[in-house]
Amino acid sequence: MIVSPSILSADFSKLADEIRDVERCGADWLHLDVMDGVFVPNLTFGPVIVDAVNRISDLPLDVHLMIVEPLKYVERFARAGADWITFHIEAEDRPLETIKAIHAQNVRAGISISPPTEVKRLEPFLSMIDLVLVMSVNPGFSGQKFMPSVLPKVRWLREKREKEGHDFLISIDGGINAETAPLAADAGVDVMVSASYIFGSSDRCRAIQSLKSL
Ligand code: DX5
Ligand code: ZN
């Protein structure tokens, strides 16, 4: 299992220490939640912080854009050091162009779907993308409750990938902890994103290892 701690629950007053801590504990990627206060009812950070994290860490940066018109910002996040750029299908009228723009920057492209969105909406893009991020909470905040009702999306993606020979990874994001992670693993995810469970744990290494071993 690939584990991608979301720094949304880290202590930003000592971000470098927080990142080194999860790196030492075996984190595979770092998940960076970019929010614009329009697509979601919360604001976080933009390319300046992505660039700072890139200078602190050698881990692949898994940038999750929860912003409207992501196509406009692809180049800026790529320049800041993103290795993966994932945008929301609900936020972009030109998904094809967005995927192409991400690939043109030599960055891997992902599409995310919020809980109310039908997974079939991703069908036309599955042969082109490198990752599908299935949201298991409504995007906007860490620390929300996992929604098991999204797990059939993971199973559908898994089957589709097998049948049609695609090679995107399946990631899950929201409410992942010791109880919910095994459910997501059973459904077939490749990547676990987790903020509060990892950063809020008194033993972060144990939390990361518990996800990695699934
Ligand atoms: C939510 C973000 C998530 C969030 C996960 O909109 O996309 O990445 O940080 O937080 P937890 O793991 O606490 O649910
Ligand atoms: Zn996220």
Image: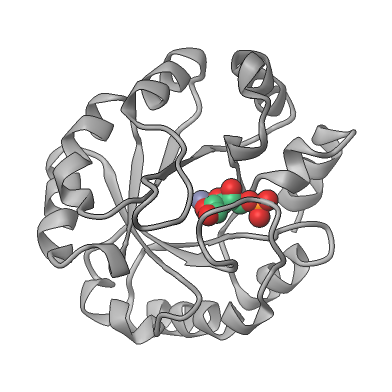
Q: Nearer the viewer, residue 98 or 43?
A: 43
Residue name at image x 14 percent, y 44 percent: 72
Left-right relation of 172 to 34: right
Tell me: residue 183, above or below residue 88: below
Left-right relation of 68 to 9: left
> Residue 39 location, x and y as percent?
35, 58
Q: Which residue in the rendered view is the most extreme toward the right?
A: 202
Q: Nearer the viewer, residue 208 or 141?
A: 141
Tell me: residue 61, above or below residue 144: above
> Residue 82 location, x and y as percent?
34, 33
- For the C terminus, give its image quadrant: bottom right
Residue name at image x 57 percent, y 79 percent: 150
How many marks the image carries: the answer is 0
Residue name at image x 67 percent, y 70 percent: 184
> Residue 33 location, x and y as percent?
47, 43
Residue name at image x 12 percent, y 42 percent: 104
Q: Is residue 193 visible?
A: no
Find residue 129 and report its image quarter. bottom left
Tell me: residue 132, above or below residue 6: below
Left-right relation of 140 to 105: right
> Residue 137 location, x and y as percent?
59, 66
Q: Is residue 87 visible?
A: yes
Left-right relation of 47 to 3: left
Q: Which colouring convention does the figure follow?
A: one colour
